[in-house]
Image (cartoon, helix red, strand yellow):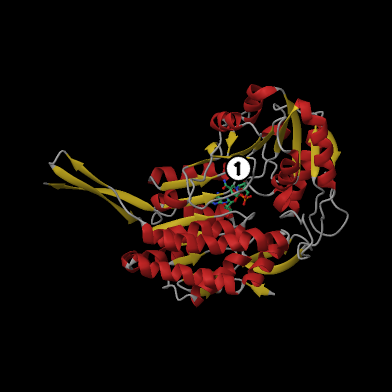
Amino acid sequence: MQRLGNFINNRFEESAAHFDDIDPATEEVIARVPDGDADDIDRAAKAACDAFPEWSRTPGAERSRFLLAIADGIERHFDEFAELESRDNGKPIALASRLDIPRAIANFRFFATAILHQSSEAHVTDGKALNYTLRQPLGVAGLISPWNLPLYLLSWKIAPAIAAGNTCVAKPSELTPLSANRLAESIIEAGLPKGVVNIVHGYGPKAGAALAAHPNVPLISFTGGTATGAKIAAAAAPMFKKLSLELGGKNPNVIFGDADLDAAIPTSIQSSFANQGEICLCGSRIFVERSIYDEFVERFVAAARKLRIGDPLDPATEVGALISEGHMRKVLGYVDLAQQEGGTVVLGGKRVDRRGFFVEPAVITGLGCECRTLQEEIFGPVVTITPFEGEEEAIALANSTRYGLSASVWTRDLQRAHRVAAAIESGTVWINCWLLRDLRVPFGGMKESGVGREGGLDSLRFFTEAKNVCVKL
Ligand code: NAD
């Protein structure tokens, strides 16, 4: 059995205490994970601090080459990474191969080249002074990531952090440590100087909290649940750390009567059930204009019924296992709650009769927006479908939660598409599509879905400090 080590100063350290990493599809232990603590975080932060002066002075073109080499290393071992991600998370290997691993490679390549095109501003003050802006790395970045898209989100943080000249300490999710551990091998292969990237495994309240509160880690980029984000913000605030919080969602998927259902239905199946509904951007609240409600429900349920649930390592599988037994119980609990609240489960919602944490995709109707089922993030293969009348009601329903991460709108009416996009309170609105991502665009949430923006220039701005230099003319 593989015993992972914390990765500090380009070495895998032996750890005194470990816990089990469980394959959610088989319930078997597949690795032993270091139970990282404050001492491990402290050693990693020291390694990162020591590496910072030289790394921050390394020319951009050289930093870029290291990032490209890491991307090439992941690509050379593509199948191995995809399999690790699938086994660790329970996601279909087809999805890991189509989404997670290509995106991890793209993240390193994107920021490797973005850094070469960075420019900064100058402001001339009435012929009296010249101001120019220096964008400087801050030091050690603390990077905390969740289990649903493990390498995709970890690389989304590591790549811009080190491209901009910071060093980092990353704390991957305790539930999915394998791809981060394999990434550390690619980092060694790429020849990245020691201490630039350090990875400490362990539980959130122990290793994660120690990282968020570490005095020598001046910026924290966190992706995870809203409640955890609040704890991190509370720990970071007295030290005035720079913070980026990418949090939970309860995203609306609004289908108007004139939508092209031949496109809206298959994409809505994806936005509902891809990765077992465990993507922060999944559209878990579907709102359908009453004129097409019956047709939509019938066609959507028929398509959802056809999804192939099974062994995540089988290339034909479309729905794999949920991440853990605890999470599966939470999801099943919401299906029960939906019925107590008066909803009808028109499809699925039961545990699959086999080993592993499999839940049948569930479709629930008959509930209003005030119900907990439509207010709380379930983060599983469970969607509600609710009818609406007209644009005003659609917008009100879409905005009726404390979250504001993303939304999809389906209509052929161009003016309405723009009006509704402007009125929906969320960081991203997709019109007639879902999860179409361009790495240059700002990404983040409104309301309780997050603070700050990452992506493209926004990431490079987050991972640098702007300094104005004023020269008298
Ligand atoms: P989580 O908040 O439980 O954990 C996320 C990370 O934070 C893990 O590494 C965990 O160990 C760590 N952590 C937990 N408690 C901590 C603490 N007190 N201090 C410091 N670190 C701590 O989230 P999760 O269950 O891993 O992920 C699912 C959540 O992530 C969902 O709410 C989902 O919507 C959200 N998410 C958001 C985005 C986005 O871009 N907005 C993307 C993916 C997932």
The residue closer to the viewer here, 301 or 146, is: 301
The residue closer to the viewer here, 217 or 314, is: 314
| Above or below for 143 versus 336 | below
The residue closer to the viewer here, 5 or 373, is: 373
The residue that mark 1 highlights is 248
| Above or below for 49 versus 129 | below
Residue 271, horizontal then vertical, whole percent:
69, 45
Query: 6 left or right of 254?
Result: left
Residue located 68% across and 23% down the image: 390
Residue located 78% across and 41% down the image: 333
SS at circle 1:
loop
Query: 198 left or right of 18?
Result: left
Queried on whether the Cβ of the residue with tag 1 lies below 8 angstroms from ligand 1, the answer reads yes
Q: Is residue 37 visible?
A: no
- Given the image, on which type of amino acid does mark 1 rest? Gly
Quadrant in which the N terminus appears: bottom right
Within 10 Å of disc 1 (Cα), the crowding (few <14, some 14-19, many 20+) is: many
Residue 146: image quadrant is bottom right
Residue 364, horizontal then vertical, whole percent:
80, 36
Q: Is residue 360 visible?
A: yes
Residue 36: image quadrant is bottom right
Residue 161, horizontal then vertical, whole percent:
43, 58
Residue located 63% across and 66% down the image: 178
Q: Residue furthest right?
A: 353
Residue 267, horizontal then vertical, whole percent:
71, 45
Query: 127 left or right of 341?
Result: left
Count of number-bearing discs: 1
